[in-house]
Amino acid sequence: MGRNGIRVFASDDGWAASREVGSDPNYDGESYGADISSDGTLLATSAFDGMLRVYALGGPRDAALRLLKSARVEGGQRPFSVAIAPDKKRIAVGFADSPAVAVVDAGDLTAAYSPSVQGVANGTLSAVAWSADGRQLLAAGAWKRGEGQHGLRRWADGGRGAFTDSTVAANSVVDLRALPDGRLAFASTDPALGVLAATGTRQFYVTAGISDFRGDRARFRLTARGNGVSFTSAYGTQQSAAFDFDAMDWAEPAAAWQASPVTGRDMQLVNWFESARPQLNGRAITLEANEIALSAAVNQAGNGLALGTSFFVRYLQRDGRELWRVPAPGSTWQVAQSQDARWVVAAFSDGSIRWYRARDGAEQLALLPHADKRRWVAWTPQGYYAASAGGEDLIGWQLDRGPVRAADFFAGSRFRATLFRPDVISQLMATGDAAAALQAANDAGGRKAESARIERQLPPTLTVLSPSDGDGVGSPQVRIDLVVRATTDAPATSLRVRVNGKVVSVPGAEALAKPAAGAAESRHTLTVPLPAEDAEVMVFAENRYGFSTPAVLRLRWTATPAPPPAVAAPSGAPDTRPVLYVLAVGISKYRDAGLRLDFPSKDASDFANVFQTQQDGLYRKVVVKLLTDEKARRDDVLDGLEWIRREMTARDVGVVFLAGHGTNDSDGVYYYLPQDVETDRLKRSGVIFTEIKNTLASLPGKVLFFVDTCHSGNVLGTGRRSVRNDITAVVNELSSAENGVIVFAASTGRQDAQESREWNNGAFTKAVIEGVSGKADYARTGRVTHKMLDLYTSERVKMLTKGSQSPVTIVPQGVPDFPLVLAR
């Protein structure tokens, strides 16, 4: 607690409740290190006041915390981490300001010995740990062994003996923990979490998935208007990624995109990089305590400097006067200024890139480009956003509930109906102002202004009381006790349950009784059927604003596992294999000749035929309904959706394929265009997305949706291409966890889906048919799973279209990979 010292708490019930057992407020600096001995009797802490402190800890019911000894430790001014040896005779200390590691006697805190730090010249070994047997001492920190490589040192004989070095992480290591079996857990500021085997090989490693912008400053470049940005997304790489807001997608940077200089004719910046004392034109720039300059950019006119630091983005004139500064959401790794002088654009350690108005520093836009170079999300300060397929839950809202209750978190998708506004993001670069962009988008689409305050449109929240995540079960059903909380004006009306991705029928879930007047919470008990296998149970609560974030239970099956499903039933035994239902719709010959296409009807026929061959394999029967051209009028399509809803059971698999034209109206609502559509009467003659979603989300078995409707041409003829043919919202909504549909889309965002007489199909359909026919079975397993089909389709379409079309597959949370077809 900084200069307020430390407080110690204890618990007798697994931290369901706790109590304070002691404190020491007599610190004169921040404390970053604490360790409790394996027998729970000693506590050691390190602090930036230079002191090492050792306390006696009483038993669980002893409220005493007693300081035994405190002393300064030789080796550095800022002790960072501390580790008590298993035998409690020694304590190791790492420092934030020195490469040294100190080992002291645990009794009197006098120096015992100093492990060798030979070769550690460019960084620190601030994090220390002992092996479980005490024979090895380990340390890591900001020590760099190479570009993007931070080192780990292991000393034999508890730090007295020889050492070996290895690479552990891409950024500074802040904590090490030895595990009893000889493995080592570590945390680093990438951010990353990992486990190393005793041999040093990496067994487990997970990062946040954000882009790391610490690369070459010359590769952080902008278009002249600031509507495109290129960057390095991984530390140490020379490959650039880029995003273009005109295309609203990933892009390739052009030669005209420029990096900003760090000095100009009248702007001489010196001693600035990783410095606390930068100078502009001979004058010192005053920074906060512990603030360090990390990036800089001078504008085109040479009279304005953007300075990115560990705390702020600052904007200064040539005389050193600061015009504005804004708090940085992380270290400011990169900064640039657009040539038209409108924007200061900065890239931060939290993975975001943000656009600030150069005149006043007001943030107008943020972009989170995921490190996978597929997903992204961009948003305004008001919360209006645009996102790739699968990208909208990269952000969310945290809602404070006061000082004694934990905050609620709502993923971005929970507010899709009101806040998903790619039209606003498109307008922003033209207007240079988020409020003006919203007004322009509303005017263009004929929309009324709406409040973006999320506290007025909250979905429920849901907490499971029992069982606990990870519990074992051995019966075909489990009782789940839960609490649902919602605002009093929008109580929860129903619950939805999915088990291993499939909707299950649960008595009492479809209609909930209203809570007592004024009550925000209600308790419910569900009896959920389970398969004879490990299961992931997801429970959702719904009110008039939408679905809650799911409560997830992973339950272990403890009884005898069920046998795997047979490809064919033994003679005389009942055939329990599922039925595959396929609804394939494709329209080439529209009644309106201006909409006609070449291959969608053939695509649907070919798609249906390839699945028809799967009868008597994984499926005891394949039932196909094929609707093409004149047989795919609006009523026919609606009847087809009703047919698959009526026929499917929980054991079955449903596949729906739509090819032809699709479009978004002025409100962004998506319609599939049937053969008899009248584009000037879209609401009456088109198939609204709601019909498709309601059908697919209600199907009781496993469900896959293949959609190939983003063909070229503005079918409504208004010239507003920025809104038309963007299927992203459809993909995201169907693949949300509460709907549970696996979605294969022919293209992303505003890309056109291509067809060619060379392929005699659309590129997407050709790739899917090849994959289902067996080419997706790379490992020759004899089966094609949906993940295997995703990989094959993605790569094949890119090859066919020379990279101009990128299909996307989104698999909802909770849906495991499963065999879709036999490879034949």
Image (cartoon, helix red, strand yellow):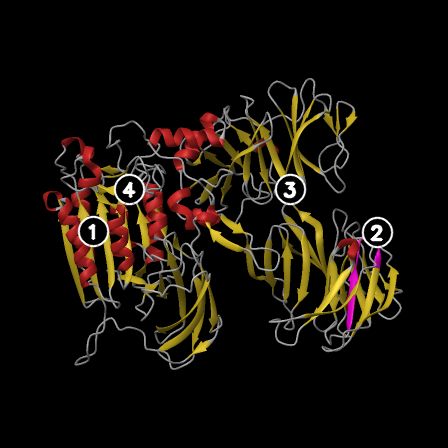
> Which numbered mark, 2 or 4, is in the foreground of this view?
4
- Residue 302: x percent and y percent? 64, 19
| Quarter assignment of residue 36 | bottom right
Q: CA distance from mark 3 to mark 2?
A: 24 Å
Question: Disc 4 vs disc 1: Cβ atoms closer than 8 Å?
Answer: no
Residue under pointer 1: 607
- Placement of the C terminus among the 4 image quadrants: bottom left
| Quarter assignment of residue 820 | bottom left
Chain part drawn in magenta: 42-51
Residue under pointer 4: 670
First in sequence: mark 2 vs mark 1 = 2
First in sequence: mark 3 vs mark 1 = 3
Residue 406 higher or lower than 349, as above or below: below
Q: CA distance from mark 2 to mark 4?
A: 63 Å
**Residue kind at label 2, given as amino acid type:** Gln
First in sequence: mark 3 vs mark 2 = 2
